[in-house]
Image (cartoon, helix red, strand yellow):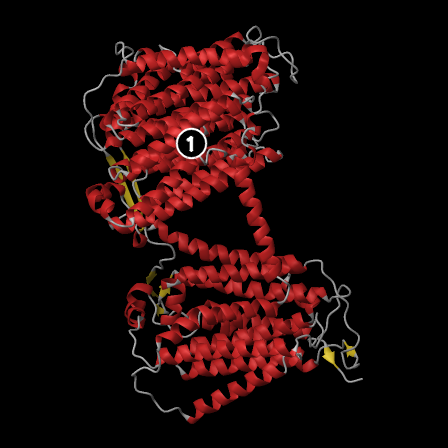
Amino acid sequence: MLLTIVLLPLLLGTLATFWLGSRSRLLTACAAGTVTATSLGLLLSMAPAVLAGETVMNAWPWVPEIGLNLTFRLDGLSMMFAGLILFIGLMIILYAHYYLSAKDSAGKFYSEMMLFMAAMLGVVLSDNLLLLVVFWELTSVSSFLLVGYWSYRPDARAGARQALAVTGGGGLAMLGGFVLLGQIAGTYELSEMLGHVAAIQADPMFLPALLLILLGAFTKSAQFPFHFWLPDAMAAPTPVSAYLHSATMVKAGVFLLMRMYPVLAGSGYFEAIVTTVGLITVLFAAFIAIFKHDLKGLLAYSTVSHLGLITFLVGLGSPLAAVAAVFHVLNHATFKASLFMIAGIVDHETHSRDMRKLGGLWSLMPWTATLSMVAAASMAGVPLTNGFLSKEMFFTEAVVGTSGAFAWLVPALVTLAGVCSVAYSLRFVHDTYFNGPLGDVPNTHPHEPPLGMKLPAILLVTLCIVVGVLPALTLGPLVDVAATALAGKPLPEYHLAIWHGFNLPLLMSAIALVVGVALYLMLAKNKRLHRIESEAWFGRATGRQMFEGLVDGLFVLAARVTTRLENGSLQSYVAWMLGGVVLVVGWPLLSSGIGTGPRELLPASPLAIMIWLLLGAVSLALALQHHKRFQAVVLVGVVGLVTSLTFVSLSAPDLALTQLSVEVVSTVLLLMGLALLPQHSPRESSSTRRARDAALALAAGAGMAWLTWVFVTRDYSSISWYFLDKSIPVGGGSNVVNVILVDFRGYDTFGEITVLGIAAIGVLALMEGMRTRRPTQDSDGRTWTFAAQPLMLRVAAGVVLPVALVFTIYIFMRGHNMPGGGFIAGLITAVALVLQFMSMGQAKAEYLLRGQGGRRFVKWIGSGLGIAGLTGVGAFVWGRPFLTSAHGYPVVPVLGELPLASAALFDLGVYLVVVGSTLLTISVLGTVTREAPGASGLRQKVLS
């Protein structure tokens, strides 16, 4: 059930809205609303059990080897946040339908919103910490897409990149903290960690884990000094701001603090860090919000301040602070989402959010103004609103939760924050709807928006009043179970009520209201506030300036390193790589004193000695003759031939056959590629560089030889017994090598053929349209001629092709039980078809193959990858891991018992990718030197 709640928006919601986006804006919104309402209905169906104190758990294994499982947990805290995500999301869907213009893509917006909603649901419902990280990073990516929705605007792109960098970086830090925490606890299941809290906090790695996790939470919830990304994200469409920055994304950080509180709190470090950061944030952001001239900018800083308030309450650690924290999460979501929507309405009607230009809208938009005043009153903490109740609880906990030197300082600071809150709330209303006539805005004739656009704000503002008057009746049960889950223990008796008598918190509220109004009136006199630019106060000490300076510094450093290392010299690159390997690997091994092992050595056979001498001679000749490219290719082929003989001597016929086939194909491809280059490489290296290269080559070669010697002269425990034992019963084949490739290590093979296909298509992309002149002479002055292919070659090719194809089928079909398989079969087919290109010429060969300039070969590659991928996905139908093969031995009349395995389909995909990649590369390389349609012929070098 819990997985369904997440999957509905993740799969159905994103796909349906994306598909409907170009067809009907109304149907797109309805689809998004239906999916959201269905998930909300499923959540509410489990609410009675959760409100009764139960915890709903659902779990499925995913990657159990690393502790990653699909474990979901629904208790009071997660139900509160999930309900908030879905309910506010439903309001935003309705609001966005009216807000977005006809030029804005509805499919893009709603599909990205569904993706983000699913990610947030995954965050709040996950019990497995690694799973939480997966959804956490998905929120960063999807919010990046939403903030940058208007991608044509530079400020939207910049805000999206900045938000992704800050929150994504915090997410990586959080991942490190979770890994440390999981290693300490021996599990990544949060519900299991609760039984090992004392041991976790006693571990020396607890403090680093705590700091990393808090860094992730603070960056996500825009806590000081990471607050700067949130105001810059206001370049997003208002529905995005109303959703992400009131009830969802920015609340993910405080949710993490609440969820991890039972594990992390109690050590003293958690409380000290969290309360300090929260208190600084609530005061700093509240003060800055007063001086913001942009409606959404003011709301952004007020959001940062209120998030600091919640963070401060979580850090206090008392049970009643937990109640105040979860209560304010709900209250803040209602009044802040409505205020963002109202700011969007004002922007929608006047095309401006600058409060220095607004004013006088009360007479033009009275309903919107009334909604603004109620929501702003709740934000300021005016009595009879829900904001007043949670502010009173905040003041109460600030008084009773501090002692000693902070007994007067903390209450004074939070009262000052309350003063600033009243001031910026009053400014939001006064500068927008009063304070003179409407200024110089793009649209000087605004009017009330459609009812559908106002309806979500009306519902949320109504909740502000209803909860403010009847808190215990409306949200009391939900707050109780959520605060209990946060505290991790039963709560003492408390009451959510409007009146608690005359006390110090009430006095603090009165002071905040009176002084806040006076402060605003003083600043607003003669519109003095409009002339204050808060951005100039801090110079380059603002978070944004420091972030941009850090990014610019990284780019400068990267440019210097790139200029120093990436100088266009392949020799330099290889030298750095080999030098680094020799230094990093060789030095520790040499200093360890490891030498020849105790294993008994066997005498070398004369054949082996001859092969080694041949390999050494060829390698030396290659080093001396590498400037002559044709000879170098031939010598490399000889090295490959010697390697295949080595495989034969080690009883590996599969590898030997593969090596031979690869050598033939690669030699042809190399020769075609070298035909585009001069025949001789210029001698540009100085004697010093040649000496350096020789030293590095000898060091690397000697190091590998020595490392190999160290290993082979020691006894070792091989895992080959496992594959030999499991090859037939598990993989259904007796050819262990092939079973490993298509079953045990099938995922590796799938990755390898993907890379092969990408490489071939990369050749097409790089060289398509490229043309070069055929040379008339070689470097020695001898003339090139393009005569017709020899008759014997054409006859031989005609005979070889059908024989090779029959042999290919034989090799392919026997591959699962005897040497062979799709890769070798593909190479044999490729060699036979390469021979056809050589005998007929490219034009005729491609015509007969219907190559379509290589396009058909691209389809072969795609088909091969698709068949291989679908074979792997098919295992999911039977609840097995990806690429698990099925096999059987049906009895067929006449043929008898047939060994069949689904791995044959995977092998077919491998076969198609190998053939398609080879032919595509040949087609592209051949086309580069084609001078006229139908031109063909094998280049033959004839002495002039």
Q: Nearer the viewer, residue 341 or 543?
A: 543
Q: Residue placed at 49% from the left, 76% from the top?
A: 700
Foreground: 652 or 559?
Answer: 559
Question: Looking at the rendering, in which quadrant would you find the C terminus?
Answer: bottom right
Residue drawn at 71 percent across, 77 percent down = 789
Q: Which quadrant of the structure image shows residue 352?
A: top right
Residue at point 37%, 69% (across, down): 895
Quarter of the image for residue 419 reads: top left
**745 and 625: which is toward the camera:** 625
For label 1, the crowd category at 10 Å Cα-Cα, with few meaning under 14, some 14 to 19 and many 20 or more, is many
Residue 304: % across, % down: 44, 28
Image spot of residue 915 (x, y percent): 55, 65
Residue 349, given in percent of the width and then of the height, sits at 59, 16
Residue type (three-letter) at the residue carrying disc 1? Val
Q: Would you place residue 435 above or below residue 554 in this image?
A: above
Residue occupied by mark 1: 250
- Res 304 visible: yes
Position above or below: 24 against 191: above
